[in-house]
Image (tube, rainbow, N blue to C red):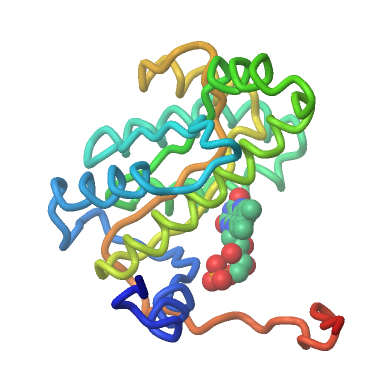
Amino acid sequence: MASHITTDQFLAAAKYRRTVYALKGSSSVSDSRIEEVVKDVLSFAPSSYNTQSARITLVLGDKHKQFWDIVIKESEPILKGAGEAVWNAMEPRFQGFKNAYGSVVFWEDGKTIKQAQDTHKASAAMFPEWADHASGMHQLLVWTALELEGLGANLQHMNAIPPVEAALKKFLDVPEEWKLKAHLNFGDEAQPHPDAPQKLPVSETFKVVS
Ligand SMILES: Cc1cc2nc3c(=O)[nH]c(=O)nc-3n(C[C@H](O)[C@H](O)[C@H](O)COP(=O)(O)O)c2cc1C
């Protein structure tokens, strides 16, 4: 059965997604609609062997501000350790992320990955990588869907600083075996929706063999 959505409509929707940094602390989309969108993605997004290791926490309003207060507190000594200039460059960025309305936090459940490795022993070594691929697919779907709703969003990786991950796990009350993969700040746009950045010429990135 053919889909009622055309390929061009699908690609146009995917192309609309952009990194939007300037976000307001408001959302023209209701919390329940945001929740519905995220849950919908979890209900159909692909994963290797249908493993379903992706986990998502939705953080809204004041909790989003507290989330960023934790990131700032935990990362400050580490980034300052890398040089005052590093902290001076990052701190305003973090404050900008805090200004947003909410975060979609993407995790991977290590227990589920381990079970898949035990079940499919021949491919066991591949499962962490495949879980990352699947997480990226979830991230892209949620990011695109929220922007189609009219919000702006940007994807961040504060898991690069280990104490941040530990503190966020505690704050969001997630199991120890979950691993932080990425998180998406979102809110009403405080800037015009950007155009796509320049891409490499397709002659450098694509080849057809026939
Ligand atoms: C895997 C991945 C990781 C990214 N990590 C970050 C990040 O940590 N911080 C950030 O500001 N943007 C991050 N981005 C956003 C990219 O910088 C952005 O997608 C790219 O510049 C193209 O712009 P666009 O999103 O508007 O298409 C990431 C994007 C991808 C796909």
Residue 67 place in picture, x, y as percent? 38, 32
Q: Is residue 184 above or below residue 8?
A: above
Residue at position x 67%, y 84% in the image: 198
Q: Is residue 161 above or below residue 143?
A: above
Residue 55 in view in this figure: yes
Residue 107 in view in this figure: no
Residue 134 place in picture, x, y as percent? 57, 44
Residue at position x 29%, y 58% in the image: 187
In this view of the protein, which residue sits in the foreground, 67 or 77? Answer: 67
- Whereabouts is ligand 1, in terms of quadrant? bottom right
In this view of the protein, which residue sits in the foreground, 170 or 117? Answer: 117
Choose top left, top right, bottom left or bottom right for residue 42: top left
Q: Is residue 113 left or right of residue 50?
A: right
Residue at position x 38%, y 43% in the image: 104
Q: Residue furthest top?
A: 176
Q: Residue furthest front?
A: 1
Q: Is residue 51 left or right of residue 160?
A: left
Choose top left, top right, bottom left or bottom right for residue 59: top left
- Count the marks: 0
Q: Is residue 68 above or below residue 9?
A: above
Q: In the rendered view of the protein, which quadrant contains the N terminus?
A: bottom left
Residue at position x 75%, y 20% in the image: 121
Q: Is residue 93 left or right of residue 95?
A: right
Residue 176 place in picture, x, y as percent? 51, 11
Q: Is residue 82 left or right of residue 90?
A: right
Q: In the rendered view of the protein, which quadrant contains the C terminus?
A: bottom right
Residue 135 place in picture, x, y as percent? 54, 42
